[in-house]
Amino acid sequence: MIEGADLIQAAAFLGAGLAMGLGAIGPGVGEGMVGAKACEAIGKNPSEAGLLTRTMLVGQAVSESTGIYSLVIALLLLFVV
Amino acid sequence: MMSIDIEAWVKVAAFLGAGLSMGFGAIGAAIGEGFAAAKANNAISENPTYSGDIIKMMLVGQAIAETAAIFALVIGVLLLFAAGGNVSMITAAGLIGAGLSMGLGAIGSGVGSGFPAGEACAGLARQPALSRSLTTTMLIGSAVSQTPAIFSMVIAFMLMFINFSGGSPHMVAALLGAGLCMGFGAIGSGIGSGFPAGQACVGLARQPAMGSRLTTNMLIGAAVSQTPAIFAMVVSFMLMFVSFAGTPVHPTSAALIGAGLATGLAAIGSGVGSGLAAGAGCEGWARQPMTSGNVLVIMLVGQAVSQTPSIFGLLISFVLIFKGYAATEVFIVSTALLSAGLCTGLGGIGAGVGNGQVAESAVSWVARNVEQEAVLMRTMLVGQAVSQSTAIYAMVVSLALIFLV
């Protein structure tokens, strides 16, 4: 017999997996694009490699944010709600 | 209350499996053939004198891309008329698994084989004299791109014709998981193998003297891109042949489906990503034959890092398969284990593709500017590591779902 509380808990676990799993797709692709363009830019203008790497990391950090939101929601679903 | 006997369920599963096989299986080949035809049209407008040769090339290439859909048709017809000799729910699960394995598994190879077909047409317009060697390279490349669909067909045949019906009740979930794993797991490798195959044809037209070496690089790159599909095949075999008798049916059943999803889905990204790096490798060899050694090194490093998400998937699958579970009918635990598989699987897709994009660019710039090899390698690895992070979060959430719940 499945109680309402069981169903809620199960939905929270499924939600955690889906939030983190689906939420990880975008940042992975987006950060890849940043990395790709940084390599291209360094190939074209190697003297600015330091600046370009720094810009790449800043850009990737911003694109990481949605992945971190997913992680926060997943952890909340797992351990808080 | 419906009363449906098991014999009817087996029929239901066979028909559903046939539909899934042919429905999914038609997607990829059609896209791949469309790409080939589009490139052929372009090529004919560039060089109408050779329209006959270009059309012939297009048709040969399309015929190979069609193979994946024909595999799906064969499995579909067999499911309709020849399958289901044994009457049990395990047989029924095997038939649905066979349909999923073949249908999903044909998508990538269909798309992937289209790339060499199209690029060979484009190359022929530029270099009509190379007709023979372009055809050879295209045939090898397309054939290699079919491999993941062949893996899927092998798994589908095993799910249909091996008699698992004497096994423990877990086999229902295990066979569904095996079908899902191989089906999803073949998508990325099929598409990914198409990139080096296509770029080898482009490169041959640009630099005919590199012909045989381009084929070598294409085969190396495509072989590495197959790795995620091989991981998926290994997990499918384990789900089919590891005995789960003695373990509790619940929650082990959910864990087995989760295991199939983790490796299968995560393999999509790694397959595509490794293929992007391999494609850039072939392009680089043709552009700058002098730097082929440097290009090969960075290509292989980039491909290896792109495999990481599928290795995370494999790790979670192994944990899900082999961790012993206490018997429980509580539905929460089963959901958590299924969710763990989905999380690492889906979470690996983006990271795999992203790692591949970084590697693709780094490889092509090493070919153009080899003095900057070291700094490009360093930037590539940093960029890939950052784009790996979300796959790592997904793995952490999966481990929490498996061990803390």
Image (tube, rainbow, N blue to C red):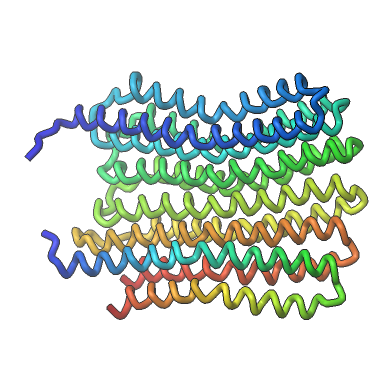
Nearest the camera: A71 or B305?
A71
Drawn side of residue B54 relative to residue B36, left or right: right
Which residue does the image show at 57% across and 27% down from the upper left? B66
Nearest the camera: B120 or B209?
B120
x and y percentages locating residue B403 in the rendered image:
36, 69
Q: Is residue B5 visible?
A: yes
x and y percentages locating residue B324 in the rendered image:
33, 59
Q: Looking at the image, is A65 positioned above or below residue B399?
A: below
Which residue does the image show at 36% across and 68% down from the upper left? A16
Q: Is residue B98 visible?
A: no
Nearest the camera: B105 or B395?
B105
x and y percentages locating residue A74 in the rendered image:
38, 72
Image-quadrant location for residue B229: top right
Which residue does the image show at 73% across and 31% down from the upper left? B138
Q: Looking at the image, is B302 positioned above or below residue B60?
A: below
Drawn side of residue B164 relative to residue B398, left or right: left
Q: Residue furthest left?
A: B1
Which residue does the image show at 35% across and 33% down from the upper left? B17
Drawn side of residue A28 relative to residue B220, left or right: left
Image-quadrant location for residue B382: bottom right
Position of the N terminus of chain B by quadrant? top left
Q: Looking at the image, is B63 positioned above or below residue B176?
A: above
